[in-house]
Image (tube, rainbow, N blue to C red):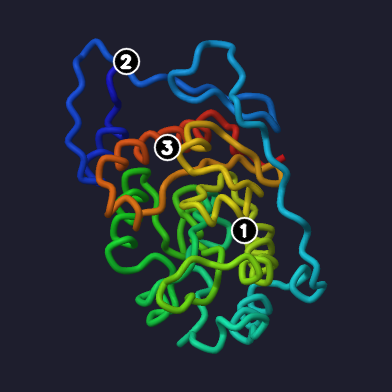
């Protein structure tokens, strides 16, 4: 069938102008049993994906963080000096959005503008992410209907100097905060954006391009892999692939695979 209005809106919001003959259709991706990945678009019917479901992240080790409510967790992040990133930050970047949002967006590390404003995904990358959310009829607003809201957080809460890549020890020390955020939000679907978000949540060094197009699980929650908006700004042709990932995520939610177990 032809693209529906929601899918055409996604294309418009992301700045895509893609022509498609009337006889072509978007491959449908149906839900699979809990704990199994789903076939990628275009995969032969009945063929299992080549990438297995990967183990969930390790449990939070720090009891004070593992049991923290939202105010205590926010205070713990603001006071954190567990790694050297605290020395160069202007402020921590905790996260933003509805505390019970059905969607959770996990990014990589704050950049200079995030460090200035204390909010994830600002600047040009943030504008593109907001456009992607609008295409899904979603918002990062903290109030409103949880089904139409997203909570946005980064793998790291402090900016690496010079926007360099996160280092393994920094990711390990910051991980308990993200784990607890996911536990508090209890999202029905996680959208992992970028290589380091994927590494943190799925425990893999496979590239994003090999993991996208199918549904993974993080502690029972469906997880869809896609490109980081900052990457998309530098690699415009991959916007079409990111659009496919959004369609997959929306399809999972609509089919009920995002219902918490």
Give the mark nearest the N terminus, 3 or 1.
1
Q: Quadrant of residue 10?
A: top left
Give the residue at x 35% y 53%. 231
Give the mark nearest the N terminus, 2 or 3.
2
Q: Which residue is mark 2?
A: 1
Relative to 170, does residue 242 appear above or below in the rendering? above
Relative to 19, does residue 226 appear above or below in the rendering? below
Within 10 angstroms of label 2, few (less than 14), some, or many (20 or more) residues? few
- Count the labels in the image: 3
**Residue 204, horizontal then vertical, whole percent:** 63, 46
Q: Which residue is mark 1?
A: 185
Q: CA distance from mark 1 to mark 2?
A: 35 Å
Task: Say left or right for 204 vs 143.
Answer: right
Q: Quadrant of the C terminus?
A: top right
**Residue 185, horizontal then vertical, whole percent:** 62, 58
Task: Say left or right for 21 vs 45.
Answer: left
Q: CA distance from mark 3 to mark 1?
A: 22 Å
Q: CA distance from mark 2 to mark 3?
A: 18 Å
- Circle 3: element type: helix
Q: Quadrant of the N terminus?
A: top left
Give the residue at x 54% y 23%. 39
**Residue 162, horizontal then vertical, whole percent:** 40, 76
- Circle 2: element type: loop
Q: Nearer the viewer, residue 119 or 144?
A: 119
Q: Which mark is residue 148?
A: none
Within 10 angstroms of label 1, few (less than 14), some, or many (20 or more) residues? some
**Residue 245, horizontal then vertical, whole percent:** 42, 37
Q: Nearer the viewer, residue 145 or 161?
A: 161
Q: Which mark is residue 245?
A: 3
Marks 2,3: beta carbons within 8 A = no
- Circle 1: element type: helix
């Amino acid at each position: 069938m032809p693209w529906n209005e929601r899918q055409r809106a996604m294309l418009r919001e992301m700045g895509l102008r893609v022509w498609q003959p009337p006889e072509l259709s978007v491959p449908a991706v149906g839900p699979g049993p809990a704990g199994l990945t789903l076939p990628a678009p275009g995969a032969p019917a009945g063929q299992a994906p080549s990438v297995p479901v990967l183990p969930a992240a390790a449990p939070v080790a720090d009891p004070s963080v593992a049991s923290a409510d939202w105010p205590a967790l926010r205070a713990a992040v603001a006071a954190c000096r567990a790694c050297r990133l605290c020395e160069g930050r202007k402020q921590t970047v905790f996260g933003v959005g509805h505390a019970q949002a059905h969607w959770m967006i996990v990014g990589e590390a704050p950049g200079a503008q995030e460090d200035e404003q204390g909010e994830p995904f600002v600047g040009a990358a943030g504008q593109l992410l907001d456009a992607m959310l609008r295409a899904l009829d979603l918002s990062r607003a903290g109030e409103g209907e949880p089904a139409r809201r997203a909570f946005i957080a980064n793998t790291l809460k402090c900016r690496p100097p010079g926007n360099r890549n996160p280092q393994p020890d920094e990711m390990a020390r910051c991980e308990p905060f993200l784990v607890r955020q996911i536990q508090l939000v209890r999202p029905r679907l996680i959208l992992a954006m970028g290589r380091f978000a994927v590494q943190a949540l799925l425990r893999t060094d496979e590239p994003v391009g090999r993991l996208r197009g199918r549904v993974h699980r993080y502690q029972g929650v469906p997880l869809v892999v896609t490109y980081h908006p900052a990457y998309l700004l530098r690699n415009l042709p991959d916007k079409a692939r990111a659009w496919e990932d959004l369609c997959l995520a929306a399809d999972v939610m609509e089919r009920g695979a995002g219902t918490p177990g």
